[in-house]
Image (tube, helix red, strand yellow):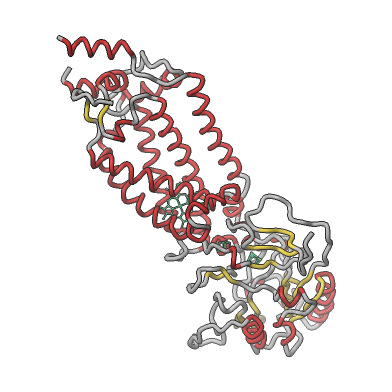
Protein backbone atom coordinates (compact mmCIF):
# COMPACT_ATOMS: atom_id res chain seq x y z
CA UNK A 1 0.00 0.00 0.00
CA UNK A 2 1.44 3.28 -1.08
CA UNK A 3 2.26 5.70 1.66
CA UNK A 4 -0.20 8.51 1.23
CA UNK A 5 -1.06 11.19 3.69
CA UNK A 6 -4.81 10.58 3.40
CA UNK A 7 -6.19 7.15 2.55
CA UNK A 8 -8.91 6.96 -0.07
CA UNK A 9 -11.97 5.04 1.09
CA UNK A 10 -14.24 5.61 -1.89
CA UNK A 11 -13.61 6.69 -5.46
CA UNK A 12 -16.15 7.83 -8.07
CA UNK A 13 -17.03 5.48 -10.96
CA UNK A 14 -14.99 2.65 -9.48
CA UNK A 15 -16.58 -0.73 -8.89
CA UNK A 16 -13.76 -2.50 -7.06
CA UNK A 17 -12.94 -2.00 -3.35
CA UNK A 18 -10.59 0.76 -2.26
CA UNK A 19 -7.56 -0.12 -0.14
CA UNK A 20 -8.95 -0.33 3.36
CA UNK A 21 -6.65 -2.00 5.85
CA UNK A 22 -5.74 1.20 7.69
CA UNK A 23 -8.24 2.62 10.18
CA UNK A 24 -8.36 6.40 10.34
CA UNK A 25 -10.27 8.53 12.80
CA UNK A 26 -13.21 10.38 11.28
CA UNK A 27 -12.84 14.14 11.37
CA UNK A 28 -15.49 16.84 11.51
CA UNK A 29 -15.88 20.58 11.40
CA UNK A 30 -18.43 22.03 13.78
CA UNK A 31 -20.05 25.35 12.91
CA UNK A 32 -21.82 26.93 15.85
CA UNK A 33 -24.30 29.20 14.15
CA UNK A 34 -25.25 30.78 17.48
CA UNK A 35 -21.71 32.09 18.05
CA UNK A 36 -21.09 33.31 14.50
CA UNK A 37 -21.06 37.10 14.10
CA UNK A 38 -21.08 37.03 10.29
CA UNK A 39 -17.71 38.76 9.91
CA UNK A 40 -16.71 36.62 6.88
CA UNK A 41 -13.16 36.11 8.09
CA UNK A 42 -13.62 32.47 7.11
CA UNK A 43 -14.52 33.48 3.54
CA UNK A 44 -11.33 35.50 3.36
CA UNK A 45 -9.23 32.74 4.91
CA UNK A 46 -10.62 30.29 2.37
CA UNK A 47 -9.64 32.52 -0.56
CA UNK A 48 -6.27 33.11 1.00
CA UNK A 49 -5.32 29.52 1.71
CA UNK A 50 -6.75 28.10 -1.51
CA UNK A 51 -5.41 30.99 -3.59
CA UNK A 52 -8.77 31.88 -5.06
CA UNK A 53 -9.76 35.35 -6.20
CA UNK A 54 -13.35 35.50 -7.32
CA UNK A 55 -14.49 38.34 -9.52
CA UNK A 56 -15.56 41.34 -7.51
CA UNK A 57 -19.35 41.40 -7.73
CA UNK A 58 -21.80 44.09 -6.75
CA UNK A 59 -23.87 44.52 -3.64
CA UNK A 60 -27.24 42.83 -3.93
CA UNK A 61 -28.73 44.94 -1.15
CA UNK A 62 -28.04 42.38 1.57
CA UNK A 63 -24.97 41.24 3.44
CA UNK A 64 -24.64 38.10 1.31
CA UNK A 65 -21.57 38.74 -0.82
CA UNK A 66 -20.87 36.95 -3.03
CA UNK A 67 -24.54 36.04 -3.17
CA UNK A 68 -23.87 32.42 -4.04
CA UNK A 69 -21.17 29.78 -4.08
CA UNK A 70 -19.07 29.80 -7.25
CA UNK A 71 -16.16 27.79 -8.62
CA UNK A 72 -13.95 30.33 -6.84
CA UNK A 73 -15.99 30.95 -3.70
CA UNK A 74 -16.14 27.67 -1.82
CA UNK A 75 -17.83 29.08 1.23
CA UNK A 76 -20.29 31.96 1.62
CA UNK A 77 -22.12 33.41 4.58
CA UNK A 78 -25.89 33.37 4.22
CA UNK A 79 -27.92 35.85 6.26
CA UNK A 80 -31.57 35.37 7.15
CA UNK A 81 -33.83 37.75 9.05
CA UNK A 82 -36.63 35.86 10.79
CA UNK A 83 -39.14 36.85 13.40
CA UNK A 84 -39.37 34.49 16.34
CA UNK A 85 -41.74 35.18 19.25
CA UNK A 86 -42.04 38.80 18.20
CA UNK A 87 -38.29 39.31 18.12
CA UNK A 88 -36.05 39.73 15.15
CA UNK A 89 -33.43 37.03 14.82
CA UNK A 90 -30.50 37.40 12.47
CA UNK A 91 -29.56 33.87 11.52
CA UNK A 92 -26.19 33.60 9.85
CA UNK A 93 -25.00 30.37 8.32
CA UNK A 94 -21.66 29.54 6.76
CA UNK A 95 -22.62 27.56 3.64
CA UNK A 96 -20.35 25.12 1.83
CA UNK A 97 -19.82 21.42 1.28
CA UNK A 98 -21.16 19.27 4.12
CA UNK A 99 -18.77 16.37 3.42
CA UNK A 100 -21.56 13.81 3.53
CA UNK A 101 -20.77 10.29 4.70
CA UNK A 102 -22.93 9.14 1.79
CA UNK A 103 -22.07 11.77 -0.85
CA UNK A 104 -24.55 12.22 -3.70
CA UNK A 105 -21.88 13.96 -5.78
CA UNK A 106 -19.60 10.93 -5.66
CA UNK A 107 -22.45 8.57 -6.41
CA UNK A 108 -23.41 10.54 -9.52
CA UNK A 109 -19.92 11.20 -10.92
CA UNK A 110 -19.16 9.14 -14.06
CA UNK A 111 -15.41 9.88 -14.16
CA UNK A 112 -13.17 7.42 -12.27
CA UNK A 113 -11.33 9.19 -9.47
CA UNK A 114 -12.75 12.67 -10.08
CA UNK A 115 -14.35 12.55 -6.62
CA UNK A 116 -12.84 10.69 -3.70
CA UNK A 117 -13.79 10.21 -0.09
CA UNK A 118 -10.86 9.89 2.27
CA UNK A 119 -10.95 7.41 5.10
CA UNK A 120 -11.23 10.35 7.52
CA UNK A 121 -14.52 11.38 5.87
CA UNK A 122 -13.42 14.34 3.73
CA UNK A 123 -14.96 14.38 0.24
CA UNK A 124 -12.54 15.87 -2.28
CA UNK A 125 -12.73 16.69 -5.99
CA UNK A 126 -9.68 15.78 -8.09
CA UNK A 127 -10.07 18.18 -10.97
CA UNK A 128 -7.45 16.45 -13.12
CA UNK A 129 -9.91 13.54 -13.53
CA UNK A 130 -13.03 15.70 -13.87
CA UNK A 131 -14.71 15.68 -17.29
CA UNK A 132 -17.00 18.64 -16.57
CA UNK A 133 -20.36 16.91 -16.97
CA UNK A 134 -21.92 18.48 -13.86
CA UNK A 135 -23.43 15.19 -12.64
CA UNK A 136 -22.09 16.04 -9.16
CA UNK A 137 -24.32 19.12 -9.16
CA UNK A 138 -27.26 16.88 -10.04
CA UNK A 139 -26.38 14.38 -7.30
CA UNK A 140 -25.70 16.78 -4.40
CA UNK A 141 -28.62 17.25 -1.97
CA UNK A 142 -27.12 20.55 -0.73
CA UNK A 143 -26.58 22.38 -4.06
CA UNK A 144 -22.84 22.77 -3.49
CA UNK A 145 -20.57 21.93 -6.45
CA UNK A 146 -20.08 24.59 -9.11
CA UNK A 147 -18.82 24.12 -12.67
CA UNK A 148 -16.20 26.69 -13.62
CA UNK A 149 -16.99 28.73 -16.73
CA UNK A 150 -13.25 29.02 -17.35
CA UNK A 151 -12.12 25.41 -17.32
CA UNK A 152 -15.36 23.39 -17.07
CA UNK A 153 -14.17 21.60 -13.94
CA UNK A 154 -16.26 21.22 -10.79
CA UNK A 155 -15.10 22.87 -7.56
CA UNK A 156 -16.15 22.96 -3.92
CA UNK A 157 -14.77 23.14 -0.39
CA UNK A 158 -12.04 20.54 0.18
CA UNK A 159 -12.22 20.87 3.98
CA UNK A 160 -8.58 21.93 3.43
CA UNK A 161 -7.63 18.28 2.88
CA UNK A 162 -4.07 19.47 2.24
CA UNK A 163 -3.92 21.07 5.69
CA UNK A 164 -5.68 18.21 7.44
CA UNK A 165 -3.23 15.75 5.86
CA UNK A 166 -0.39 17.43 7.76
CA UNK A 167 -2.29 17.75 11.02
CA UNK A 168 -3.56 21.31 10.58
CA UNK A 169 -7.11 22.53 11.02
CA UNK A 170 -8.90 24.00 7.97
CA UNK A 171 -8.09 27.66 7.22
CA UNK A 172 -11.59 28.88 8.17
CA UNK A 173 -11.33 27.18 11.56
CA UNK A 174 -7.94 28.73 12.17
CA UNK A 175 -9.17 32.21 11.44
CA UNK A 176 -12.61 32.41 13.09
CA UNK A 177 -12.33 35.17 15.74
CA UNK A 178 -15.19 33.90 17.93
CA UNK A 179 -14.35 30.22 17.85
CA UNK A 180 -17.64 29.50 16.09
CA UNK A 181 -15.87 27.00 13.81
CA UNK A 182 -14.06 24.12 15.42
CA UNK A 183 -12.32 21.07 14.06
CA UNK A 184 -11.40 17.68 15.46
CA UNK A 185 -12.52 14.09 15.49
CA UNK A 186 -16.21 13.64 14.79
CA UNK A 187 -16.75 12.19 18.29
CA UNK A 188 -15.00 15.11 19.89
CA UNK A 189 -17.04 17.62 17.89
CA UNK A 190 -20.26 15.93 18.92
CA UNK A 191 -19.23 16.34 22.56
CA UNK A 192 -18.45 20.01 22.03
CA UNK A 193 -21.83 20.42 20.35
CA UNK A 194 -23.63 18.70 23.23
CA UNK A 195 -22.26 21.17 25.74
CA UNK A 196 -23.15 24.11 23.56
CA UNK A 197 -26.67 22.81 22.95
CA UNK A 198 -27.25 22.34 26.66
CA UNK A 199 -26.18 25.94 27.18
CA UNK A 200 -28.51 27.19 24.45
CA UNK A 201 -31.42 25.23 25.88
CA UNK A 202 -30.85 26.84 29.27
CA UNK A 203 -30.94 30.21 27.56
CA UNK A 204 -34.40 29.67 26.11
CA UNK A 205 -33.68 27.92 22.82
CA UNK A 206 -35.64 24.78 23.63
CA UNK A 207 -35.23 23.42 20.09
CA UNK A 208 -31.46 23.89 19.90
CA UNK A 209 -29.72 20.90 18.42
CA UNK A 210 -27.06 19.39 16.20
CA UNK A 211 -27.43 19.22 12.42
CA UNK A 212 -25.80 15.94 11.37
CA UNK A 213 -28.46 14.65 8.95
CA UNK A 214 -28.79 10.85 9.03
CA UNK A 215 -30.36 10.81 5.53
CA UNK A 216 -26.88 11.25 4.04
CA UNK A 217 -25.24 9.03 6.66
CA UNK A 218 -24.31 12.04 8.78
CA UNK A 219 -21.95 14.79 7.66
CA UNK A 220 -18.38 15.77 8.42
CA UNK A 221 -19.43 19.41 8.61
CA UNK A 222 -22.04 19.86 11.31
CA UNK A 223 -24.00 22.83 12.58
CA UNK A 224 -25.20 23.75 16.03
CA UNK A 225 -28.57 25.41 15.33
CA UNK A 226 -30.78 27.33 17.75
CA UNK A 227 -33.80 26.08 15.79
CA UNK A 228 -32.73 22.55 14.92
CA UNK A 229 -36.38 21.63 14.36
CA UNK A 230 -36.55 24.07 11.44
CA UNK A 231 -33.22 24.10 9.58
CA UNK A 232 -34.93 25.71 6.58
CA UNK A 233 -35.00 29.00 8.54
CA UNK A 234 -31.26 29.26 7.90
CA UNK A 235 -31.57 30.27 4.25
CA UNK A 236 -32.99 26.96 3.14
CA UNK A 237 -30.78 24.44 4.90
CA UNK A 238 -32.59 21.22 3.89
CA UNK A 239 -34.70 19.50 6.50
CA UNK A 240 -33.80 15.79 6.49
CA UNK A 241 -31.77 15.77 3.25
CA UNK A 242 -30.97 12.56 1.42
CA UNK A 243 -29.82 11.54 -2.03
CA UNK A 244 -32.84 12.03 -4.32
CA UNK A 245 -34.62 8.76 -5.19
CA UNK A 246 -34.26 9.79 -8.85
CA UNK A 247 -30.47 9.88 -8.43
CA UNK A 248 -30.53 6.48 -6.72
CA UNK A 249 -32.63 5.09 -9.56
CA UNK A 250 -30.32 6.63 -12.17
CA UNK A 251 -27.16 5.40 -10.49
CA UNK A 252 -28.44 2.25 -8.79
CA UNK A 253 -29.12 -1.33 -9.78
CA UNK A 254 -30.99 -0.39 -13.00
CA UNK A 255 -27.79 0.17 -14.95
CA UNK A 256 -26.08 -3.17 -14.39
CA UNK A 257 -29.44 -4.75 -15.30
CA UNK A 258 -29.70 -2.65 -18.47
CA UNK A 259 -26.14 -3.63 -19.35
CA UNK A 260 -27.02 -7.30 -18.94
CA UNK A 261 -30.14 -6.82 -21.05
CA UNK A 262 -28.07 -5.23 -23.85
CA UNK A 263 -25.58 -8.09 -23.70
CA UNK A 264 -28.58 -10.44 -23.83
CA UNK A 265 -29.89 -8.81 -27.01
CA UNK A 266 -26.47 -9.02 -28.66
CA UNK A 267 -25.88 -12.64 -27.68
CA UNK A 268 -29.50 -13.55 -28.42
CA UNK A 269 -29.05 -12.24 -31.97
CA UNK A 270 -25.85 -14.17 -32.43
CA UNK A 271 -27.38 -17.42 -31.21
CA UNK A 272 -30.51 -16.85 -33.27
CA UNK A 273 -28.32 -16.67 -36.35
CA UNK A 274 -26.33 -19.71 -35.35
CA UNK A 275 -29.37 -21.83 -34.51
CA UNK A 276 -31.92 -20.71 -37.11
CA UNK A 277 -29.55 -19.75 -39.90
CA UNK A 278 -29.94 -16.77 -42.22
CA UNK A 279 -33.23 -15.87 -43.83
CA UNK A 280 -32.28 -16.37 -47.51
CA UNK A 281 -34.30 -15.50 -50.58
CA UNK A 282 -35.85 -18.75 -51.72
CA UNK A 283 -34.31 -20.44 -54.74
CA UNK A 284 -37.80 -21.24 -56.05
CA UNK A 285 -38.76 -17.58 -56.25
CA UNK A 286 -35.50 -16.74 -57.99
CA UNK A 287 -35.98 -19.49 -60.57
CA UNK A 288 -39.58 -18.44 -61.14
CA UNK A 289 -38.53 -14.88 -61.92
CA UNK A 290 -35.71 -16.11 -64.18
CA UNK A 291 -38.23 -18.17 -66.15
CA UNK A 292 -40.48 -15.15 -66.56
CA UNK A 293 -37.51 -13.16 -67.86
CA UNK A 294 -36.64 -15.84 -70.41
CA UNK A 295 -40.10 -15.69 -71.97
CA UNK B 1 -21.44 -8.44 -58.32
CA UNK B 2 -23.08 -7.26 -61.51
CA UNK B 3 -26.24 -5.41 -60.77
CA UNK B 4 -29.32 -6.53 -62.58
CA UNK B 5 -31.15 -3.71 -64.37
CA UNK B 6 -34.35 -5.40 -63.26
CA UNK B 7 -33.50 -4.92 -59.58
CA UNK B 8 -35.97 -2.73 -57.76
CA UNK B 9 -35.10 0.70 -56.42
CA UNK B 10 -35.86 0.77 -52.68
CA UNK B 11 -34.03 3.91 -51.54
CA UNK B 12 -32.86 7.03 -53.35
CA UNK B 13 -29.31 8.27 -52.89
CA UNK B 14 -30.47 11.07 -50.65
CA UNK B 15 -32.48 8.71 -48.45
CA UNK B 16 -29.44 6.50 -48.09
CA UNK B 17 -27.15 9.40 -47.26
CA UNK B 18 -29.66 10.62 -44.68
CA UNK B 19 -29.81 7.17 -43.12
CA UNK B 20 -26.01 6.93 -42.91
CA UNK B 21 -25.73 10.29 -41.18
CA UNK B 22 -28.29 9.10 -38.62
CA UNK B 23 -26.52 5.73 -38.28
CA UNK B 24 -23.01 7.10 -37.84
CA UNK B 25 -24.08 9.77 -35.39
CA UNK B 26 -26.05 7.17 -33.45
CA UNK B 27 -23.06 4.86 -33.10
CA UNK B 28 -20.85 7.72 -31.94
CA UNK B 29 -23.59 8.81 -29.50
CA UNK B 30 -24.03 5.33 -28.10
CA UNK B 31 -20.27 4.85 -27.61
CA UNK B 32 -19.73 8.25 -25.99
CA UNK B 33 -22.96 8.06 -23.97
CA UNK B 34 -22.18 4.59 -22.62
CA UNK B 35 -18.90 5.98 -21.32
CA UNK B 36 -20.90 8.06 -18.82
CA UNK B 37 -23.55 5.38 -18.35
CA UNK B 38 -21.56 2.94 -16.23
CA UNK B 39 -17.90 2.72 -15.16
CA UNK B 40 -17.56 -0.54 -17.11
CA UNK B 41 -17.90 1.49 -20.33
CA UNK B 42 -15.77 4.48 -19.31
CA UNK B 43 -12.78 3.30 -21.41
CA UNK B 44 -14.93 3.99 -24.51
CA UNK B 45 -14.24 7.68 -23.85
CA UNK B 46 -10.72 7.04 -25.20
CA UNK B 47 -12.23 6.64 -28.68
CA UNK B 48 -13.09 10.31 -28.54
CA UNK B 49 -9.83 11.56 -27.08
CA UNK B 50 -10.70 11.10 -23.40
CA UNK B 51 -13.54 11.81 -21.03
CA UNK B 52 -13.56 15.56 -21.48
CA UNK B 53 -13.76 15.32 -25.27
CA UNK B 54 -16.49 12.68 -25.06
CA UNK B 55 -18.45 15.00 -22.76
CA UNK B 56 -17.97 17.96 -25.11
CA UNK B 57 -18.73 16.11 -28.36
CA UNK B 58 -21.68 13.94 -27.31
CA UNK B 59 -24.37 16.65 -27.17
CA UNK B 60 -23.30 18.18 -30.50
CA UNK B 61 -23.49 14.75 -32.12
CA UNK B 62 -26.91 14.50 -30.50
CA UNK B 63 -28.05 17.68 -32.21
CA UNK B 64 -26.74 16.35 -35.55
CA UNK B 65 -28.61 13.09 -35.04
CA UNK B 66 -31.81 14.79 -33.91
CA UNK B 67 -31.89 16.97 -37.03
CA UNK B 68 -31.08 14.16 -39.46
CA UNK B 69 -33.52 11.87 -37.67
CA UNK B 70 -36.24 14.46 -38.08
CA UNK B 71 -35.57 14.51 -41.84
CA UNK B 72 -35.80 10.73 -42.08
CA UNK B 73 -38.90 10.75 -39.89
CA UNK B 74 -40.78 13.00 -42.31
CA UNK B 75 -39.56 11.06 -45.35
CA UNK B 76 -40.87 7.73 -44.05
CA UNK B 77 -43.69 8.67 -41.73
CA UNK B 78 -46.51 8.02 -44.22
CA UNK B 79 -45.08 4.62 -45.16
CA UNK B 80 -45.15 3.51 -41.53
CA UNK B 81 -48.82 3.91 -40.75
CA UNK B 82 -50.09 0.70 -39.14
CA UNK B 83 -52.71 -1.37 -40.99
CA UNK B 84 -54.77 -4.42 -39.95
CA UNK B 85 -52.41 -6.60 -42.04
CA UNK B 86 -49.51 -5.33 -39.91
CA UNK B 87 -51.32 -6.29 -36.73
CA UNK B 88 -51.92 -9.76 -38.13
CA UNK B 89 -48.22 -9.98 -39.04
CA UNK B 90 -47.22 -8.90 -35.53
CA UNK B 91 -49.51 -11.50 -33.96
CA UNK B 92 -47.67 -14.16 -35.87
CA UNK B 93 -44.17 -12.75 -35.52
CA UNK B 94 -43.16 -15.91 -33.63
CA UNK B 95 -43.27 -17.92 -36.86
CA UNK B 96 -41.11 -15.32 -38.57
CA UNK B 97 -38.49 -15.38 -35.80
CA UNK B 98 -38.56 -19.16 -35.94
CA UNK B 99 -37.32 -18.85 -39.52
CA UNK B 100 -40.55 -19.94 -41.13
CA UNK B 101 -41.92 -16.96 -43.08
CA UNK B 102 -43.87 -18.76 -45.84
CA UNK B 103 -47.28 -18.24 -44.33
CA UNK B 104 -46.78 -14.70 -43.09
CA UNK B 105 -49.39 -12.20 -44.30
CA UNK B 106 -48.44 -10.16 -47.33
CA UNK B 107 -46.53 -6.99 -46.46
CA UNK B 108 -46.14 -3.60 -48.11
CA UNK B 109 -42.88 -1.66 -48.19
CA UNK B 110 -42.52 -2.21 -44.45
CA UNK B 111 -43.79 -5.02 -42.28
CA UNK B 112 -45.46 -4.59 -38.90
CA UNK B 113 -42.19 -5.12 -37.06
CA UNK B 114 -40.40 -2.46 -39.05
CA UNK B 115 -43.24 -0.03 -38.43
CA UNK B 116 -43.15 -0.70 -34.70
CA UNK B 117 -39.41 -0.13 -34.81
CA UNK B 118 -39.94 3.17 -36.63
CA UNK B 119 -42.34 4.56 -34.03
CA UNK B 120 -40.40 3.23 -31.06
CA UNK B 121 -37.21 4.82 -32.37
CA UNK B 122 -39.04 8.10 -32.95
CA UNK B 123 -40.29 8.15 -29.35
CA UNK B 124 -36.79 7.35 -28.04
CA UNK B 125 -35.24 10.06 -30.19
CA UNK B 126 -37.72 12.63 -28.94
CA UNK B 127 -37.12 11.67 -25.29
CA UNK B 128 -33.35 11.67 -25.77
CA UNK B 129 -33.28 15.05 -27.50
CA UNK B 130 -35.46 16.77 -24.91
CA UNK B 131 -33.76 15.19 -21.87
CA UNK B 132 -30.34 15.67 -23.49
CA UNK B 133 -30.87 19.43 -23.63
CA UNK B 134 -31.87 19.35 -19.95
CA UNK B 135 -28.60 17.57 -19.09
CA UNK B 136 -26.42 19.91 -21.17
CA UNK B 137 -24.78 21.87 -18.37
CA UNK B 138 -22.32 23.70 -20.60
CA UNK B 139 -25.10 25.78 -22.15
CA UNK B 140 -28.28 25.23 -20.16
CA UNK B 141 -29.30 25.43 -16.56
CA UNK B 142 -32.56 23.84 -15.45
CA UNK B 143 -33.95 23.27 -11.94
CA UNK B 144 -32.10 20.38 -10.34
CA UNK B 145 -35.21 18.19 -9.88
CA UNK B 146 -35.84 18.43 -13.62
CA UNK B 147 -32.21 17.58 -14.39
CA UNK B 148 -32.46 14.50 -12.14
CA UNK B 149 -35.60 13.41 -13.94
CA UNK B 150 -33.96 14.13 -17.29
CA UNK B 151 -30.97 11.98 -16.34
CA UNK B 152 -33.20 9.00 -15.61
CA UNK B 153 -35.16 9.47 -18.84
CA UNK B 154 -32.01 9.97 -20.93
CA UNK B 155 -30.29 6.86 -19.56
CA UNK B 156 -33.43 4.71 -19.87
CA UNK B 157 -34.31 5.90 -23.38
CA UNK B 158 -30.69 5.42 -24.48
CA UNK B 159 -30.63 1.83 -23.21
CA UNK B 160 -33.92 1.07 -24.99
CA UNK B 161 -32.78 2.74 -28.20
CA UNK B 162 -29.45 0.87 -28.22
CA UNK B 163 -31.34 -2.42 -27.79
CA UNK B 164 -33.75 -1.48 -30.61
CA UNK B 165 -30.90 -0.58 -32.94
CA UNK B 166 -29.17 -3.87 -32.21
CA UNK B 167 -32.36 -5.63 -33.29
CA UNK B 168 -32.61 -3.34 -36.34
CA UNK B 169 -29.05 -4.13 -37.43
CA UNK B 170 -29.43 -7.83 -36.72
CA UNK B 171 -32.62 -8.01 -38.78
CA UNK B 172 -30.74 -6.50 -41.73
CA UNK B 173 -27.95 -9.04 -41.34
CA UNK B 174 -30.32 -11.96 -40.84
CA UNK B 175 -32.52 -11.27 -43.87
CA UNK B 176 -30.06 -11.83 -46.69
CA UNK B 177 -30.07 -9.32 -49.53
CA UNK B 178 -31.21 -6.46 -47.31
CA UNK B 179 -28.05 -4.52 -46.53
CA UNK B 180 -27.45 -3.66 -50.21
CA UNK B 181 -30.57 -1.50 -50.00
CA UNK B 182 -28.55 0.84 -47.80
CA UNK B 183 -25.37 0.59 -49.91
CA UNK B 184 -26.70 1.24 -53.37
CA UNK B 185 -30.43 1.39 -52.94
CA UNK B 186 -31.69 -1.64 -54.86
CA UNK B 187 -33.00 -5.07 -53.93
CA UNK B 188 -33.65 -8.10 -56.12
CA UNK B 189 -37.17 -8.81 -57.29
CA UNK B 190 -37.09 -12.18 -55.55
CA UNK B 191 -36.19 -10.48 -52.26
CA UNK B 192 -39.07 -8.06 -52.64
CA UNK B 193 -41.52 -10.78 -53.63
CA UNK B 194 -40.55 -12.90 -50.64
CA UNK B 195 -40.48 -10.25 -47.95
CA UNK B 196 -42.69 -7.41 -49.14
CA UNK B 197 -45.07 -8.91 -51.68
CA UNK B 198 -47.61 -6.09 -51.68
CA UNK B 199 -44.83 -3.59 -52.32
CA UNK B 200 -43.43 -5.88 -55.05
CA UNK B 201 -46.78 -5.90 -56.81
CA UNK B 202 -47.17 -2.18 -56.41
CA UNK B 203 -43.80 -1.34 -58.03
CA UNK B 204 -43.82 -4.04 -60.72
CA UNK B 205 -47.52 -3.91 -61.49
CA UNK B 206 -47.65 -7.74 -61.30
C1 LIG C 1 -30.29 15.73 -29.10
C2 LIG C 1 -29.77 14.62 -28.70
C3 LIG C 1 -28.89 14.43 -27.48
C4 LIG C 1 -28.37 15.36 -26.61
C5 LIG C 1 -28.52 16.88 -26.64
C6 LIG C 1 -27.64 14.62 -25.62
C7 LIG C 1 -26.99 15.18 -24.52
C8 LIG C 1 -26.42 14.48 -23.50
C9 LIG C 1 -25.74 15.08 -22.40
C10 LIG C 1 -25.57 16.59 -22.20
C11 LIG C 1 -25.28 14.08 -21.60
C12 LIG C 1 -24.47 14.24 -20.33
C13 LIG C 1 -23.02 14.05 -20.66
C14 LIG C 1 -22.45 15.24 -21.40
O1 LIG C 1 -22.53 16.37 -20.87
O2 LIG C 1 -21.95 15.05 -22.52
C15 LIG C 1 -25.70 12.83 -22.19
C16 LIG C 1 -25.47 11.58 -21.65
C17 LIG C 1 -25.81 10.39 -22.29
N1 LIG C 1 -26.33 10.26 -23.56
FE1 LIG C 1 -27.02 11.75 -24.70
N2 LIG C 1 -27.71 13.28 -25.89
C18 LIG C 1 -28.46 13.13 -27.04
C19 LIG C 1 -28.74 11.94 -27.70
C20 LIG C 1 -28.35 10.69 -27.27
C21 LIG C 1 -28.61 9.46 -28.00
C22 LIG C 1 -29.30 9.34 -29.34
C23 LIG C 1 -28.11 8.47 -27.25
C24 LIG C 1 -28.21 7.02 -27.65
C25 LIG C 1 -27.39 6.12 -27.49
C26 LIG C 1 -27.53 9.05 -26.04
C27 LIG C 1 -26.95 8.35 -25.00
C28 LIG C 1 -26.50 8.90 -23.82
C29 LIG C 1 -26.09 8.14 -22.68
C30 LIG C 1 -26.11 6.60 -22.53
C31 LIG C 1 -25.68 9.06 -21.71
C32 LIG C 1 -25.19 8.75 -20.30
C33 LIG C 1 -26.41 8.83 -19.41
C34 LIG C 1 -26.06 8.55 -17.99
O3 LIG C 1 -25.13 9.16 -17.47
O4 LIG C 1 -26.72 7.73 -17.39
N3 LIG C 1 -27.70 10.41 -26.10
N4 LIG C 1 -26.38 13.09 -23.36
S1 LIG D 1 -18.31 17.58 -13.25
FE1 LIG D 1 -18.63 16.58 -11.25
S2 LIG D 1 -19.62 14.63 -11.82
FE2 LIG D 1 -18.71 15.39 -13.71
S3 LIG D 1 -16.67 14.46 -13.77
FE3 LIG D 1 -16.41 16.45 -12.73
S4 LIG D 1 -16.58 15.96 -10.57
FE4 LIG D 1 -17.42 14.19 -11.67
S1 LIG E 1 -22.60 18.40 0.31
FE1 LIG E 1 -22.81 17.89 -1.86
S2 LIG E 1 -20.76 18.22 -2.68
FE2 LIG E 1 -20.52 18.06 -0.45
S3 LIG E 1 -20.11 15.86 -0.08
FE3 LIG E 1 -22.33 16.16 0.14
S4 LIG E 1 -23.09 15.64 -1.93
FE4 LIG E 1 -20.90 16.03 -2.16
Q: Position of residue B149 (x, y in %)?
A: 51, 54
Image-quarter location of ligand 3: bottom right
Residue toward you, A253 or B7:
B7
Q: Is residue A240 visible?
A: yes
Residue B163 point in image, percent of width and height = 48, 37
Given residues A13 and A89, the one toward you in this image is A13
Q: Looking at the rendering, which quadrant does residue A136 occupy?
A: bottom right
The residue sitting at the front extreme is B1
Image coordinates for residue B55, horizontal then vertical, percent? 48, 58
Q: Nearer the viewer, residue A28 or B44?
A: B44
For the C terminus of chain A, give its image quadrant.
top left
- Count up the numbered dots: 0
- Residue name at image x 38 percent, y 29 percent: B113
The residue at 63%/45% (across/down) is: A253
Task: Please state the horizontal and vertical placement of residue A142, each as a whole percent of the image.
Answer: 61, 67
Q: Is residue A289 above or below residue B38?
A: above
Residue A209 in view in this figure: no
Task: Say which quadrant the N terminus of chain A sits in.
Answer: bottom right
Left or right, B133 with respect to B83, comes to: right
Q: Residue at x 58, y 38 (%)?
A: A260
Q: Is A102 placed left or right of B157 in the picture?
A: right
Whether residue A82 is situated above or below residue B170 in the rendered picture:
below
A101 left or right of A194? Answer: left
- Determine whether, in the image, residue B145 is placed left or right of residue B26: right
Amino acid sequence: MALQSLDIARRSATTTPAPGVRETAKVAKLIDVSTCIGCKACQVACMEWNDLRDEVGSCAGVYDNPVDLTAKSWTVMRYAEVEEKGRLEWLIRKDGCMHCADPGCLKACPAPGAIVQYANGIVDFHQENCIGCGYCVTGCPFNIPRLSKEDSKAYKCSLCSDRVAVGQAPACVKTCPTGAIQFGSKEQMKDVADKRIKDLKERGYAQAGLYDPPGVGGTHVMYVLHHADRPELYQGLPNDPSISPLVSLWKGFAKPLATLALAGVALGSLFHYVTKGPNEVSKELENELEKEDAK
Amino acid sequence: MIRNPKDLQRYTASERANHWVVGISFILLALSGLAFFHPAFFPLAQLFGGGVWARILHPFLGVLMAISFLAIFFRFKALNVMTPADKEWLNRVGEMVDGNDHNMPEQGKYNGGQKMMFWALAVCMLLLAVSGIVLWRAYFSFPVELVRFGAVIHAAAAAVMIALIMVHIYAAIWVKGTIRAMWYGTVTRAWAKQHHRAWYRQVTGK
